Image: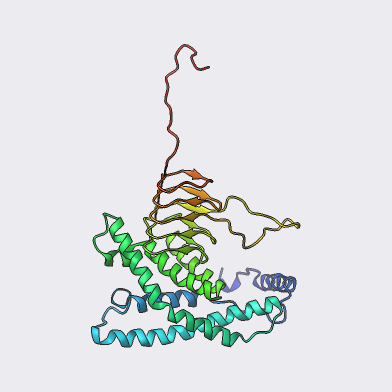
């Protein structure tokens, strides 16, 4: 049978999908002018270009020489900031329509973009400290360059340092998209609202989760599958989750948290503490604490002993 003779029922499917799409837009009161959202694809390209601007010798064009680096950085930065400004504008328009408010989104977007650009040197310094922490903290790392180009924890932190800055400046949706790009690529899930100090190192990284209101100090090291999460979720009188509550842990300076540990709620892990692998922790611990699992007891029972 020819391909042209095969009927997939496409016309009927198109009609059904159109009906469902319009019903959804009507439910959200957006049928006339459904708002456009920031583009994940474009934001992924922007972050890649930002990485090249911040680290042109390692993440930039392969044939760059000393004379051409400044031109490359300037040209790339000018282009990507224009693109970023457009994505922030889309977010601000979306929020204004949701709220039924009128706002000069163009002016707000330019302001956010300008403030973000001014923070790029500070972001580079933070990332330098993260790279150095990873190099010093992993005996398998042969150089800081290897850490930058290979380690998923550094990829996640490049995205997070950029996203957190945008989050604080008033573009939380753009920021969330950026961190979810890193989540998809690395398996490391960091909410852009999380506050993370310098010299932060995630070793291996897969399965790490850091919640929105988590606060992490300086020189903290996490291993794979660590969760800094919420213990419970408050609901309002209608049974809906209350948004924005402070609900994630505070991890003070110089803490090490080993693989599989789960730390929940607004508790504090004191400075210099070590949290062992697979520990489940829902209460604060004092500075200098060493927390591990309870020891397993193996006893031999004979002749009905222990029954």
User: Seen in the image, is 231 located left or right of residue 139?
Assistant: right
78 w.r.t. 296: above or below: below
Q: Is residue 111 above or below residue 210?
A: below
Residue 49 shows up from this direction: no
Q: Which residue is drawn at 43% across and 31% down?
A: 296
Outermost residue, front direction?
A: 287
- The residue at the point 59 percent across, 59 percent down is 246
Towards the viewer: 90 or 62: 90
**Residue 188 % position (x, y):** 45, 59
Instruction: Measuring from the top left, give residue 128's x and y in whole percent.
Output: 33, 69
**Which of these two is toward me, 101 or 122?**
122
**Looking at the image, is 288 positioned above or below residue 148?**
above
Q: Residue at x 37, y 69 (%)?
A: 127
**Figure quadrant of residue 63:** bottom left
Residue 76 in view (yes/no): yes
Q: Which residue lies furthest to the top in this view?
A: 303
x, y (%) of residue 109?
Answer: 55, 83
Locate residue 137: give its quadrant.
bottom left
Locate residue 117: give its quadrant.
bottom left
Residue 241 at x, y = what percent? Answer: 67, 58
The quadrant the N terminus occupies is: bottom right
For the rendered model, the colour scheme is rainbow
Horizontal side of 11 relative to 204 (left or right) equals right
How many labels sit on residues? Answer: 0
In the rendered image of this protein, does residue 185 appear above or below residue 267?
Answer: below
């Amino acid at each position: 049978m020819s391909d042209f003779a095969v009927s997939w029922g496409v016309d009927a499917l198109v009609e059904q999908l159109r009906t469902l799409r319009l019903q959804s837009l009507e439910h959200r009161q957006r049928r006339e002018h459904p708002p456009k959202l920031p583009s994940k694809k474009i934001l992924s390209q922007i972050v890649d270009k930002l990485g090249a601007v911040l680290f042109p010798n390692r993440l930039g064009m392969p044939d760059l020489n000393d004379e051409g680096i400044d031109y490359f950085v300037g040209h790339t930065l000018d282009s990507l900031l224009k693109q970023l400004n457009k994505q922030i504008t889309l977010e601000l328009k979306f929020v204004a329509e949701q709220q039924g408010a009128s706002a000069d989104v163009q002016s707000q977007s330019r302001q956010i973009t300008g403030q973000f650009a001014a923070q790029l040197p500070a972001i580079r310094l933070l990332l330098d400290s993260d790279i150095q922490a990873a190099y010093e903290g992993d005996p398998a790392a042969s150089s800081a360059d290897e850490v930058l180009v290979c380690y998923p924890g550094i990829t996640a932190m490049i995205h997070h340092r950029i996203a957190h800055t945008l989050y604080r400046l008033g573009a939380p949706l753009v920021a969330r998209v950026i961190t979810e790009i890193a989540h998809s690529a690395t398996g490391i899930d960091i909410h852009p609202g999380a506050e993370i100090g310098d010299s932060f190192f995630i070793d291996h990284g897969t399965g790490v989760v850091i919640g929105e209101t988590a606060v992490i100090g300086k020189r903290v090291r996490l291993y794979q599958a660590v969760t800094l999460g919420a213990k419970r979720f408050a609901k309002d009188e209608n049974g809906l989750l209350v948004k924005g509550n402070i609900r994630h842990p505070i991890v003070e300076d110089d803490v090490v948290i080993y693989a599989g540990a789960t730390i929940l709620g607004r508790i504090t892990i004191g400075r210099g503490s070590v949290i062992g692998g697979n520990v489940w922790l829902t209460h604060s611990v004092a500075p200098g604490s060493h927390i591990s699992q309870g020891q397993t007891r193996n006893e031999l029972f004979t002749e009905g002993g222990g029954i």
